[in-house]
Image (cartoon, rainbow, N blue to C red):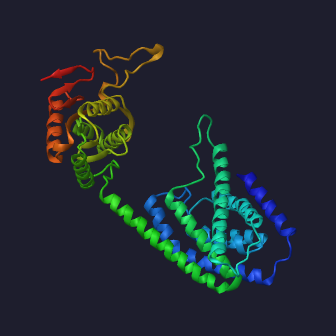
């Protein structure tokens, strides 16, 4: 990262020393652009603060409209040394509200400059670019070329950042897969910024003061998108259980009702699982509610990991969870339930006791504890030495229905009755209506 910083600074110094003289008009345009950007940044400061508070993230990159359009305008309308200097000025304006370490912010700032040079090279190669006497077709071509240069800017910057991340990985770890195309929302916001930047470049060429109007439009878009994002998060939170990240009862009812109606209309099978954490009150009593909450999160994570994206997973209340499996018959639903039971039974959960001491809660079917020589560690009475911590398991009830007769209330009643039958049969068990399967996999018909 330091090598990148120093290399870019040397390149910037060389560009300034060996560049042609900059006209007074260009300096004035740069001043107007910086003033307009300062206004946009000031107007969006509270928006960015709320976003960070909402996501709790100050480290990852997000598309910042207040940075996108001024950078594009500088690259399209100003001499390259002045454009690079303006980019540094824009980054300095954003620094007070960035909430990042100076080291990382400096590095990310330095990545802007080679990316800007690459984008400007493409722009110059596709020139000359005139902003007067354009037809509808030629003006559309200019906007498309400006967007292409903006994409080159983003790709080069991300490549540099990805390379730095790869070099900083600990031994043995691998970098996540990288794609030059980000989430559609970020890409759409970037495209909007590039269009605004093109308009700002035209304004700088003909009516520099009009850049202030572009900044006002950008701030309005910034506010509208932030407001929409906050509304979406509020809706999601109204449907989500805060402890487990699964749906709550409200979100469950909404999505499950829709899926059952779809199954009836398409004549497709549908199944429902009712999952209850065994002896959950004893976990709370023995190790405290924070450890109980950790067990609930483990169950929620397990349910999401063994189900499909289209399945409906919810915390139904207390230590009970429910899973709706569209397009799934009884046999496959039973296999899913058994995977859930087995995964929880083999789990290991780092936690704390009531005094804050570190413990590891285990599933009831977790591998036995072993000591030197791979010997199983037993107590004098013949039990495992960690028997007191083998507290995690679940009882699962399964109900299935064909699409024509699917009814959510009846499915829930049948799965709930099957789940209670599993608990009466010793817990850590899956019960499919009247068919029970124990941990050994042997059917036991009533």
Instruction: Pick whichever, 431 or 147, lies toward us.
Output: 147
Compared across the picture, whether 152 is left or right of 332 comes to: right
Q: Position of residue 189 (x, y in %)?
A: 53, 65
- Tell me residue 403's x, y (percent): 21, 43
On the image, the x and y values in percent for residue 97 come to 56, 68
What residue appears at the point 14 percent right and 42 percent down from the top-left corner?
413
Residue 351 visible to the viewer: yes
Relative to the observer, which residue lies in front, 17 or 442?
442
In the image, residue 280 sits, relative to residue 428, either above or below, namely below
Q: Is residue 422 above or below residue 156?
A: above
Give the quarter of the image for residue 20. Answer: bottom right
Residue ID at (42%, 14%): 375
Looking at the image, residue 429 sits to the left or right of residue 12; the answer is: left
Q: Is residue 2 above or below residue 149?
A: above
Q: In the depicted view, which residue is nearer to us: 227 or 408?
A: 408
The C terminus is located in which quarter? top left
> Is residue 391 something one can see in this rendering?
no
Q: Please state the horizontal and vertical placement of residue 357, each as a whole percent of the image.
A: 39, 38
């Amino acid at each position: 990262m330091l090598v990148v910083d120093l290399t870019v600074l040397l390149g910037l110094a060389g560009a300034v020393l060996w560049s042609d003289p900059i006209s007074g008009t260009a300096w004035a345009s740069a001043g107007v652009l910086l003033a307009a950007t300062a206004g946009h940044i000031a107007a969006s400061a509270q928006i960015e603060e709320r976003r960070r508070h909402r996501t709790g993230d100050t480290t990852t990159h997000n598309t910042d409209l207040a940075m996108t359009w001024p950078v594009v305008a500088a690259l399209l309308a100003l001499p390259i040394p002045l454009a690079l200097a303006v980019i540094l000025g824009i980054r300095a304006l954003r620094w007070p509200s960035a909430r990042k370490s100076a080291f990382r912010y400096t590095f990310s700032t330095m990545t802007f400059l080679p990316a800007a040079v690459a984008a400007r090279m493409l722009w110059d190669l596709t020139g000359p670019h005139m902003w007067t006497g354009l037809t509808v077709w030629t003006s559309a071509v200019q906007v498309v070329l400006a967007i292409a240069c903006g994409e080159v800017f983003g790709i080069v910057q991300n490549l540099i950042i990805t390379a730095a991340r790869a070099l900083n990985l600990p031994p043995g770890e691998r970098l996540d897969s990288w794609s030059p195309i980000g989430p559609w929302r970020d890409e759409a916001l970037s495209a909007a910024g590039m269009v605004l930047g093109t308009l700002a470049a035209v304004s700088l060429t003909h009516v520099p003061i009009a850049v202030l109007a572009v900044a006002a439009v950008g701030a309005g878009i910034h506010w509208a998108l932030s407001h929409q994002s906050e509304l979406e998060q509020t809706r999601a939170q109204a449907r989500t259980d805060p402890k487990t990240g699964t749906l709550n009862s409200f979100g469950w009812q909404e999505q499950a009702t829709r899926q059952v109606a779809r199954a009836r209309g398409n004549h497709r099978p549908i199944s429902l699982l009712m999952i209850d954490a065994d002896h959950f009150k004893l976990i709370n009593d023995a190790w405290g509610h924070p450890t109980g909450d950790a067990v609930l999160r483990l169950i929620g994570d397990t349910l999401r990991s063994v189900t499909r994206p289209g399945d409906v997973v919810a915390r139904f209340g207390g230590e009970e969870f429910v899973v709706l499996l569209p397009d799934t018959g009884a046999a496959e639903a039973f296999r899913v339930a058994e995977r859930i039971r087995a995964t929880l039974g083999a789990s290991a959960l780092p936690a704390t006791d009531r005094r804050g001491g570190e413990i590891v809660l285990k599933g009831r079917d977790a591998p036995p504890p072993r000591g030197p020589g791979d010997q199983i560690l037993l107590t004098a009475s013949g039990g495992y030495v960690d028997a007191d911590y083998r507290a995690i398991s679940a009882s699962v009830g399964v109900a299935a229905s064909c699409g024509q007769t699917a009814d959510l209330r009846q499915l829930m009643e049948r799965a709930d009755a099957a789940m209670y039958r599993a608990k009466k049969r010793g817990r850590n068990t899956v019960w499919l209506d009247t068919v029970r399967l124990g941990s050994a996999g042997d059917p036991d018909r009533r």
